Image (spheres, grey):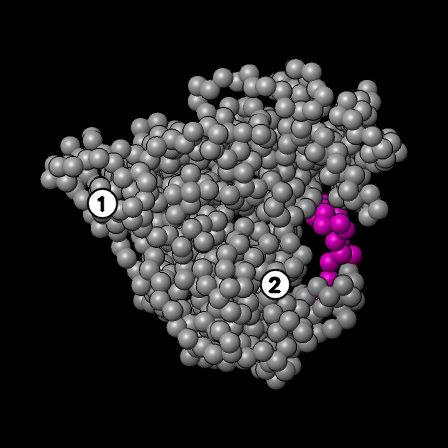
C-alpha cells in the first residue's frame, strides 16, 4: 500500500513523493441489502451501466459482497483499495464513519426531513456556510422534496441524474457507513459523545445519502432561502398595497399584463446596504463560504512542471467539513485529496498527472421570478396564457415536544419555476401586488458526484476541465488546476443559469433593477417565465437551461493563475476575461484585499526567480494582512485614529499596527481593526482599471458590476453619487 506525504496542502506534481509506513490496515466486507436498493435501479441506468462496465472498472463486486482494504498512515489518512466502484465507496464510507459518524448521521437526518423529530422544531440548523433556519423549516423543505420525489425523478433522467459509476460508489459508501455502525455495536459503540447512545443512530438508505448530496448542491441557492420558502404566507386583503383595479379581473390576459403593476421600488432610505443585501443572498464576504487557490505553471516553477496550492476556507466542524482520503482501483483509478463529509469520491485532489482545487464562484445559481397577482387573489398569478393558481403543497412533519412526538402540517407554495419565497429583507416580499419564486439551476440536476469522479481521471488540466464540462455537475465553485506538463488553468465552469444580458434587459422588473444594481442579481418577469423570459439553451451545454462551456470563462496559461473568491475577470495580474454574462460575476471591478495579497505572494516571489515547491507551500503559512501592510504607508492609520479622536486606542495601534500577519493569537483583534480601517477610510480611492490587483480596494467582497465599491448604501440607477462624507474627522475627498 502506498502512502503519500503532502506538505501544507500543496500538491506538487513534479516531486517524487516518499513512501511512509502504513500503521493500520483493515479489510471490510459486506453484502448488498434491500435498503441499498431504495433508489433505482432502472432499465436506462442498467443499460448504460453495462456499457460502462465493459470500458473500465467493474461497477459492483462479483457475488454481491463489497470488499475494500483501508490502510491508515501515521496522520490518520485512509488509503482505500478496492476492485470495483461499489467497494471503493464501501471503503470510503466506512473510513469516513470511523472519524465522522455523527456528522454523517446528521446529514442523513437532514435529508430525511427528521431534524424536528430528533432535535426539536425550534433548534437551529446552521451548516456554518449558508443555511441558518429552524429545524422545522428545514424539515418542511426536505419533506416536500421527498414528497415530490425529486431525487427519484432525477435518477430516471439520463441528462440530469447520476451515472453508473456515481450510483455504484454512492451505494457502496452508504453500505460502508452501515457496516461501521454494525461493527461498533450500534449507538452505544459510537465514541463521539455528540451522538453516542442516541436513538437516531441507525442504518440509512442510499436514498437518504442522495438527498444529502442534493442538499449540498443547493448550498449557494435554495439553501439561502430555506426560511423564506417554509414561512411564505399569502398577504390578506387588509395588508397595505392592494391596488385599486376594480373591473380588471374580466379583462383578457394581454390587457391584464399591460395594466397590473409590479412591486413598487422602496424609498432609498428603506433599502438595505449593498453588503447587507449581498449577505442575505448568500454572498456574505465574512462567511465561511470561500477559499483561495493558486496554480503555478511551467514558465514560473523551478522544475518546469505544475503545482497547486489549495486553501479551502470551509469549516473545521459540521456538515461541510472536509475529510481526506486516497482512493484506488488498481489499473483503473488512483486519486488522493479531500471531499465533503457525505460526498462520495474526491472533490479537491490530485492524481499522477493533474492536481486541482476549488474556490467559491461569484456566479448566481438561481434567478427570482416576479409574478403579478390578481387583486384580492394573492395565490392567483398572471401568465401569458391567463391567470394560474399557485401550487399549494401540504407538508406534514413529525416533531418532538416535551418528550412526545406529534405531527404538524404546513402549506408551502410553488410555481412551475420553483418555490415561492417571502423575503422582504431581500426586497422580495409577498405582497398584494406580486409574489416571487426561485428557479434553481442546482435543483435541476444530480450530476455532482459524476463530475468529481470523472475529473479524477484527468490526464491534463484541459482534460480535467473537459471532463467537468461533460456532466456539468460542479455546483458553485471555480476550478484552478495544474498538470505535469506545466499547464495551468482557471475556469468558472460551474452550474450557471443561462441568463444572458440580453434576456435580462428584456425581462427585468422594476425591483429587479434595484437588486441587480446593488447585488448583481436580476429578477425576471414571471408572467413570461415559460416563454420570452425562460432560461436559454446552449448547444454545447450538458443539459438545457445552463450556460455551455463556450459562454463560461476560462484561460490556460504557462505562468500562473489564482482565485480568492473575486470574479473571473482577473485570473492573474495580467490576464482579463471579459464579455461574459453579468450573472456570472463582475468585470472592470475592484479586487478585495484578500485577492491582492494572494496575488502578491506570487508576484513578489517571481521577482526573485522561479517558484519552488517549498516556496509555494510557504504561501500557506505567511498569513499576511494586506490592510496592515497598507496602513503603515505614510503613517495613515495613526493620522486617521487621531483625526477621529481615538485617544489611547491610537497608542495601542501605534504599537501593534505593524503586525502584518494574522497568525499570532494575542493579536487576533488587530487584523480586524486594520481591515475595518482599510474598508472605511484609507483605501477607498478611485478604482484604477489598469491595475486592479495592485491598487487598494474597498471592503472585502463588496463588488458590483459598475466597477466601484460602496459599503454604506445601495446604489440606485440615476441617484447622485456625491453623498455627504460620513467618516468622523475626515475632509471631503479623502475617503
Residue 165, can we see it? no
Q: x, y (%) of residue 475?
A: 48, 48
Point out the frontmost of discs 2 and 1: 1
- Above or below for 87 versus 503: below
At a point 44% along the width and 33% down the height, the residue shown is 515
Q: Secondary structure at mark 2?
A: strand
Q: Residues within 10 Å of mark 1 (few under 14, many from 20)?
A: some
In the image, the segment drawn in magenta is 1-18
Q: x, y (%) of residue 63?
A: 48, 80
Q: x, y (%) of residue 331?
A: 58, 62
572 or 350, which lies in front? 572
Residue 656's quadrant in the figure? top right
- Above or below for 45 versus 401: above
Q: Is residue 12 magenta?
A: yes
User: How many labels sit on residues?
Assistant: 2
Identity of the residue furthest to the front in this view: 238
Does label 2 or label 1 sit earlier along the sequence? 2
State left or right for residue 168 relative to residue 275.
Answer: left
Q: Which residue has dot 2 on it? A: 328
Where, quadrant-wise, is the N terminus in this rendering? bottom right
At a point 39% along the width and 41% down the height, the residue shown is 428
Residue 650, can we see it? yes
175 or 432, which lies in front? 432
Q: Which residue has dot 1 on it? A: 376
Q: Secondary structure at mark 1?
A: loop
State left or right for residue 671 relative to residue 202.
Answer: right
At a point 69% along the width and 44% down the height, the residue shown is 309
For the residues labelled 2 and 1, say whether their Cβ atoms are less than 8 Å apart. Answer: no
Amino acid at each position: 500500500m502506498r502512502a503519500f506525504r503532502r506538505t501544507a496542502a500543496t500538491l506538487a506534481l513534479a516531486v517524487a513523493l516518499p513512501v511512509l509506513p502504513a500503521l493500520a490496515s483493515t479489510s471490510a466486507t459486506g453484502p448488498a441489502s434491500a435498503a441499498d436498493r431504495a433508489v433505482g435501479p432502472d432499465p436506462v441506468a442498467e443499460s448504460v451501466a453495462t456499457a460502462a462496465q465493459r470500458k473500465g472498472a467493474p461497477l459492483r463486486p462479483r457475488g454481491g459482497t463489497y470488499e475494500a482494504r483501508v490502510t491508515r498512515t501515521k496522520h490518520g489518512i485512509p488509503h482505500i483499495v478496492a476492485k470495483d466502484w461499489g467497494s471503493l465507496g464501501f471503503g470510503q464510507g466506512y473510513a469516513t464513519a470511523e472519524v465522522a459518524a455523527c456528522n454523517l448521521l446528521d446529514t442523513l437526518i437532514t435529508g430525511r426531513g427528521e431534524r424536528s423529530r430528533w432535535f426539536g422544531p425550534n433548534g437551529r440548523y446552521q451548516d456554518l456556510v449558508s443555511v441558518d433556519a429552524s429545524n422545522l423549516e428545514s424539515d418542511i423543505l426536505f419533506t416536500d422534496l421527498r414528497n415530490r420525489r425529486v431525487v427519484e425523478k432525477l435518477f430516471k433522467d439520463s441528462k440530469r441524474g447520476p451515472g453508473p459509476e456515481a450510483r455504484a460508489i454512492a451505494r457502496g459508501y452508504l453500505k460502508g457507513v452501515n457496516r461501521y455502525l454494525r461493527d461498533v455495536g450500534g449507538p452505544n459503540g459510537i465514541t463521539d459523545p455528540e451522538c453516542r447512545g442516541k436513538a437516531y443512530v441507525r442504518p440509512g438508505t442510499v436514498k437518504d445519502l442522495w438527498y444529502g448530496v442534493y442538499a449540498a448542491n443547493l448550498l449557494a441557492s435554495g439553501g439561502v432561502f430555506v426560511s423564506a420558502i417554509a414561512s411564505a404566507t399569502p398577504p390578506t386583503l387588509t395588508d397595505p398595497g392592494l391596488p385599486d383595479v376594480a373591473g380588471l379581473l374580466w379583462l383578457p390576459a394581454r390587457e391584464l399584463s399591460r395594466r397590473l403593476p409590479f412591486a413598487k421600488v422602496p424609498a432609498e432610505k428603506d433599502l438595505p446596504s449593498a453588503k447587507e443585501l449581498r449577505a442575505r443572498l448568500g454572498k456574505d464576504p465574512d462567511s465561511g463560504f470561500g477559499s483561495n487557490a493558486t496554480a503555478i505553471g511551467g514558465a514560473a516553477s523551478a522544475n518546469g512542471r505544475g503545482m497547486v496550492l489549495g486553501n479551502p476556507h470551509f469549516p473545521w466542524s459540521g456538515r461541510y467539513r472536509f475529510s481526506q482520503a486516497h482512493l484506488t482501483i488498481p489499473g483503473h483509478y488512483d486519486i488522493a485529496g479531500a471531499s465533503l463529509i457525505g460526498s462520495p469520491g474526491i472533490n479537491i485532489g490530485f492524481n499522477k498527472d493533474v492536481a486541482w482545487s476549488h474556490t467559491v464562484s461569484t456566479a448566481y445559481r438561481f434567478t427570482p421570478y416576479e409574478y403579478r397577482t390578481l387583486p384580492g387573489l394573492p395565490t392567483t398569478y398572471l401568465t401569458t396564457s391567463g391567470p394560474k393558481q399557485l401550487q399549494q403543497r401540504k407538508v406534514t412533519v413529525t416533531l418532538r415536544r416535551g418528550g412526545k412526538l406529534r405531527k404538524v402540517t404546513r402549506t408551502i407554495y410553488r410555481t412551475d419555476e420553483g418555490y415561492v419565497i417571502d423575503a422582504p429583507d431581500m426586497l422580495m416580499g409577498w405582497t398584494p401586488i406580486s409574489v416571487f419564486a426561485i428557479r434553481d439551476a442546482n435543483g435541476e440536476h444530480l450530476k455532482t458526484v459524476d463530475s468529481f469522479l470523472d475529473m479524477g481521471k484527468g490526464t491534463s488540466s484541459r482534460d480535467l476541465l473537459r471532463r467537468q464540462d461533460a456532466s456539468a455537475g460542479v455546483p458553485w465553485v471555480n476550478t484552478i488546476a495544474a498538470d505535469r506538463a506545466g499547464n495551468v488553468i482557471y475556469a468558472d465552469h460551474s452550474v450557471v443559469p443561462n441568463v444572458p444580458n440580453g434576456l435580462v434587459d428584456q425581462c427585468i422588473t422594476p425591483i429587479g433593477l434595484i437588486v441587480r444594481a446593488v447585488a448583481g442579481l436580476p429578477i425576471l418577469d414571471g408572467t413570461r417565465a415559460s416563454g420570452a423570459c425562460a432560461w436559454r439553451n446552449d448547444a454545447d451545454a450538458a443539459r438545457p437551461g445552463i450556460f455551455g462551456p463556450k459562454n463560461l470563462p476560462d484561460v490556460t496559461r504557462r505562468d500562473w493563475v489564482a482565485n480568492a473568491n473575486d470574479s473571473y475577470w482577473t485570473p492573474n495580474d495580467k490576464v482579463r476575461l471579459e464579455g461574459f454574462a453579468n450573472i456570472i460575476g463582475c468585470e472592470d471591478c475592484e479586487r478585495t484585499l484578500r485577492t491582492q495579497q494572494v496575488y502578491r505572494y506570487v508576484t513578489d516571489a517571481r521577482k526573485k526567480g522561479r517558484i519552488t515547491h517549498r516556496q509555494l507551500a510557504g504561501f500557506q503559512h505567511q498569513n499576511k494582512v494586506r490592510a496592515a501592510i497598507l496602513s503603515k504607508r505614510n503613517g495613515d492609520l495613526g493620522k486617521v485614529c487621531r483625526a477621529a479622536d481615538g485617544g489611547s486606542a491610537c497608542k495601542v495601534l501605534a504599537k501593534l499596527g505593524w503586525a502584518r500577519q494574522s497568525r499570532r493569537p494575542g493579536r487576533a483583534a488587530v487584523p480586524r481593526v486594520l481591515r475595518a480601517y482599510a474598508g472605511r477610510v484609507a483605501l477607498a480611492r478611485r478604482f484604477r482599471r489598469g491595475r486592479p490587483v495592485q491598487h487598494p480596494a474597498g471592503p472585502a467582497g463588496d463588488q458590483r458590476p459598475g466597477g466601484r465599491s460602496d459599503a454604506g448604501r445601495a446604489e440606485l440607477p440615476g441617484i447622485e453619487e456625491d453623498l455627504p462624507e460620513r467618516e468622523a474627522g475626515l475632509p471631503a475627498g479623502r475617503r
